[in-house]
Image (spheres, rainbow, N blue to C red):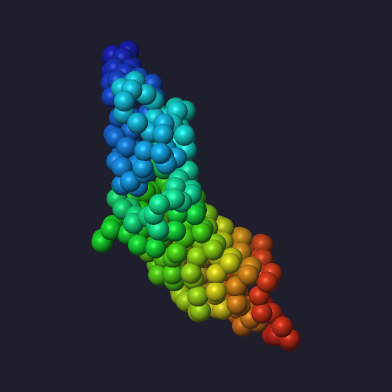
């Protein structure tokens, strides 16, 4: 009986491997990569994703540039799509649903794409379905204050880069229950609002906060008192002048 159960599991594993072509990336993820590339409308002479093509049926998308797969499962875990839109277009109209087939995605880099808009109802809120996404790089884009609330549904997020965007004034930081590193430098922030509920705060695990080169002044320190796990705070290039109150 035990031997029969063992062979049943062997057959099941072989079937799973067969669905994945035994080696390499998953066919549905390969198709999703090609659809994602098509949405960027590269011209023939300007194509930073030349290796992303379907001409070779045996091509393993885990070997494509800017793609990293898990060595065991073959699922895509990292996409480095920084600086995709640089010649011939003003920005990238994002369709976040195109990333949803990458269910094991842990690391996504969209830096320097000048993203400021997305397909209606297909914004970053859709990323809440990416349950394993931990690192999200969105620096050098055109996001305003609303981007934080759009991202708050990504409960797995540990690192968020929003440097060099259009965050400004005073705004509310929503809850990120697992966020450890938050980079907000080189914006026009002067303060932000945090909330606490029954003794807990909305960034309970935050350890690194980068606020350099904004417009914050001494009143920011009152907001920072809610970050009880904070270890590193960078605030160079701001308006910290004169005397201010120390908060415990």
Residue located 55% across and 62% down the image: 163
Can you name the residue that lies furthest to the left here? 120
Question: Can residue 12 be seen?
Answer: no
Q: As rendered, which of 220 and 93 lies closer to the eye? A: 93
**Residue 48 percent coordinates (x, y):** 44, 40
Question: Does 132 sit left or right of 239 as displayed?
Answer: left
Q: Quadrant of residue 20?
A: top left
Q: Position of residue 83 (x, y in %)?
A: 48, 49
31 vs 133, left or right, is left
Is 134 or 123 nearer to us in this picture?
123
Q: Which residue is rendered at x = 63% and y = 81% of the image?
A: 217
Residue 128 on image: x %, y %: 35, 55
In this view, which residue lies farthest toward the right?
242
Give the total of numbered labels.
Answer: 0
Q: Position of residue 121 (x, y in %)?
A: 26, 61
Position above or below: 109 against 248: above
Q: Out of 128 and 49, give the one closest to the viewer.
A: 49
Residue 188: in sight, yes or no? yes
Return the residue nearer the eye: 99 or 2: 99
Which of the image's four quarters has the N terminus?
top left
Q: Is residue 136 above or below residue 71?
A: below
Q: Which quadrant holds the C terminus?
A: bottom right
Question: Measuring 47% from the left and 60% from the top, which residue is drawn there?
Answer: 141
Residue at 46% x, 75% y is 172
């Amino acid at each position: 009986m035990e031997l029969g159960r063992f062979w049943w599991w062997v057959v099941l594993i072989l079937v799973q491997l067969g669905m994945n072509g035994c080696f390499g990336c998953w066919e549905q993820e390969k198709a999703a990569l090609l659809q994602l590339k098509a949405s960027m409308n590269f011209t023939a002479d300007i194509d930073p994703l030349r290796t992303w093509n379907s001409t070779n049926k045996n091509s393993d998308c885990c070997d494509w540039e800017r793609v990293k797969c898990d060595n065991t499962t073959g699922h895509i875990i990292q996409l480095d799509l920084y600086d995709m839109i640089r010649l011939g277009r003003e920005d990238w109209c994002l369709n976040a649903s195109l990333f949803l087939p990458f269910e094991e995605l842990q690391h996504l880099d969209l830096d320097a794409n000048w993203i400021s808009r997305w397909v209606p109802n297909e914004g970053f809120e859709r990323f809440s379905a990416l349950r394993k996404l931990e690192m999200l790089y969105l620096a050098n884009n055109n996001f305003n204050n609303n981007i934080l609330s759009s991202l708050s549904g990504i409960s797995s997020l540990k690192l968020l880069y929003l440097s060099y965007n259009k965050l400004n004034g005073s705004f509310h930081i929503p809850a990120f229950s697992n966020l450890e590193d938050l980079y907000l430098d080189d914006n026009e922030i002067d303060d932000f609002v945090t909330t606490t509920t029954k003794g807990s705060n909305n960034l309970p695990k935050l350890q690194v906060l980068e606020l350099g080169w904004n417009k914050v002044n001494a009143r920011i320190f009152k907001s920072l008192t809610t970050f009880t796990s904070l270890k590193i705070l960078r605030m160079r290039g701001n308006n910290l002048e004169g005397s201010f109150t120390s908060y415990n």
